[in-house]
Amino acid sequence: MTQVIWIVAAVLVTFSLGYVGYSKYLSRFVDIDDSRDTPAHKYEDGQEYVPAKKPVLLGHHFSSIAGGAPIVGPITAGAIWGWAPALAWVAIGNPLMGAVHDFISLSGSMRHEGKSIGYIIGEYVGERGKNMLLWFAFLTIILVVAVFALVVGIVLNAYPSAATASFVYIALAVVFGVYLYQLDGPFIPGTIVFVAGVFAGVWLGIQYPFAFFELAGEAAHPAGTFILFDGTGSWVPGAGALGGNTAAWVPVILVYAAAASALPVWVLLQPRDYLSSFLLYAGVGGALVAIVVGTFLGTSSEPLVIADSIQPFTGFLGVEGRAPYPLFPMLFVTIACGTISGFHSLVSSGTTAKQLNKESDARLIGYGGMLGEGLLAAVALSTLAIAGLGSTVIEQGGGIGGALPNFAAGGGVILTSLGIPASYGGPFMALVLVSFLLTSTDTAARLGRYMMEEIVGTQGSGTDTGFSGGLGSFARGRYTNPAVQCLVAYVLIISGEWSTLWALFGSANQLLAALALLTGTVWLANWDETKQLVSTGVPMAVMVVITVLALGFLAGYQWLYVGLIQGTAGGIGGQISMAVRIVLAVVLVYLALSLVRIGYGNISDVRGGREPAAEPSDD
């Protein structure tokens, strides 16, 4: 039987080669120089531009980019096509494409005043290209907020212990922020005390779980769960599609995301992400160590081998019993964030670039942070390999419903190698997942505000509350913009069509990655005509082809032919939903190809000796 250690070994080898060799080359390539002031120092305002120590910023960045997608994606892909194609795409694509994407996005923003990728491309191709990319990113952000808030609700419903622990570490984060930035407390002693508090919160959550409403039958919450309200919550909006308890959690998460995204970064974002990163490192690192220990020392209560139900390769069209789903191009948009993610470019050129203390930190945080997400994807694939292909995964072809039980159950088995009972290891891995998701959700809402600030224009980042009058003020306001985002996301979730958003979200996210790589390529071409464009240009071209074909398959085959022509969409509501998704797919493809054409024109002008649209900025 094949041991799970081979999944881990494959990614460790390729990731180590990438970080030691390729990331060092890229650092020289973009002329990393610590003698320059970063935007965090040049524009420090105590609100958005706040220099952060490298471990603090790495904690924020890693927590923000590592949402639920690198867990759901690899498990879904492994369930459909087998573990070998999923592993190959993560192990090879991450260091050559995803980590390059994140590092270039962060470096480019660092040289352009901490502005977004939309602003950067606008410097070289003009206002039209800038606004097209910003609107593309803003619409993608709303999909991110909706999907992540939904997944948090699903996890808190399945694991009520995670709810208690989440409240504990959010409260600790606020206190830690005051301790660090207002009381100027010593960093290392504070880290020890507050990290210990976070892990105490994990124990507290396992001992005292709580939920809004009770679940019936076999899905009932564990004994001892404190139920806040009587009944099943059938009256809560969206309860029919999601269940009362999950539907009740969704607005709570969205209100939290809107509020957290409006606060200065030192109040919650920086300290919370730093503290929660230790929980995340413990989950990912602990699982990796446990796999090694369990394999070579045989200390696991269960063998760490790939279950018989998980095949290396199930065929080009996927697992038997599921609708045909071609490996190319759908594998590459299904795994998404475990290998490359456009959302990361928004984090890198949004919050992270505004907090970078010195330029050399970009290598570990940008390139290394993406490798960390790849390790999370490998752990997720390992949990599926150990837990096996349950009936839920077969029915749903992976997805949210199949991924979460396997991640927690398989992770619990893995941690038995370290002497941790599966009854504790399973809930702990669920808490790890919630930590990823919460940070990504409110960071996404903050990034959406940044996008709109650049679309409508602003004087001083984050200073407009949104209530000063005028449509522009309302659209970019620190309080009003996140509220609008979360309201739209809430409507998408409770409509009952949330499950169909995942494929559209994955494709839009990967297409955004292609546009971020296009932005980096345009920046490099305008910076110096001798710069090679292969490192960013080839991944960009690959991702454009993959995502356009994927959206074509979804819109043309699944939604138009199967859904509308063959009539599987159901009633009028389902038909309207299918039609809307087809229109969205066409719009996304049109925007992307238009931007590629504009960007290619700029590069051709520069390399052909003609005058570029704008002079490159080195701010």
Image (cartoon, helix red, strand yellow):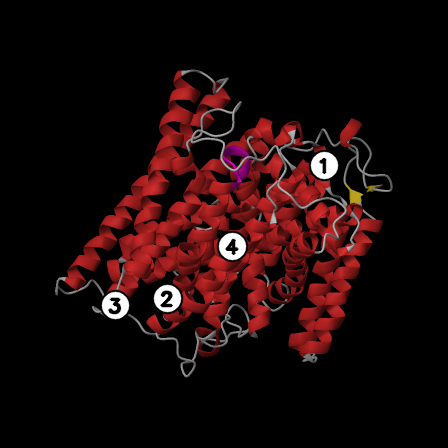
Q: Residue furthest right?
A: 224
User: Is label 2 in a helix, a strand or a loop?
Assistant: helix
Type of amino acid under label 2:
Gly
Marks 4/1: CA–CA distance: 38 Å
Marks 2/3: CA–CA distance: 14 Å
Q: Residue furthest bottom?
A: 35
Which of the two discs, 3 and 4, sits closer to the camera?
4
Image x and y of residue 352, in percent: 49, 65
Q: Which residue is mark 4?
A: 11
Pick the residue in front: 319 or 267: 319
Pick the residue in front: 21 or 62: 21
Q: Is residue 229 above or below residue 34?
A: above
Q: Which residue is mark 3?
A: 531
Marks 3/4: CA–CA distance: 30 Å
Image x and y of residue 358, in percent: 47, 77
Disc nearer the start of the sequence (1/2): 2
Q: Which residue is mark 1?
A: 245
Marks 1/2: CA–CA distance: 43 Å
Pick the residue in front: 477 or 70: 70
Q: Which residues are magenta?
A: 78-83
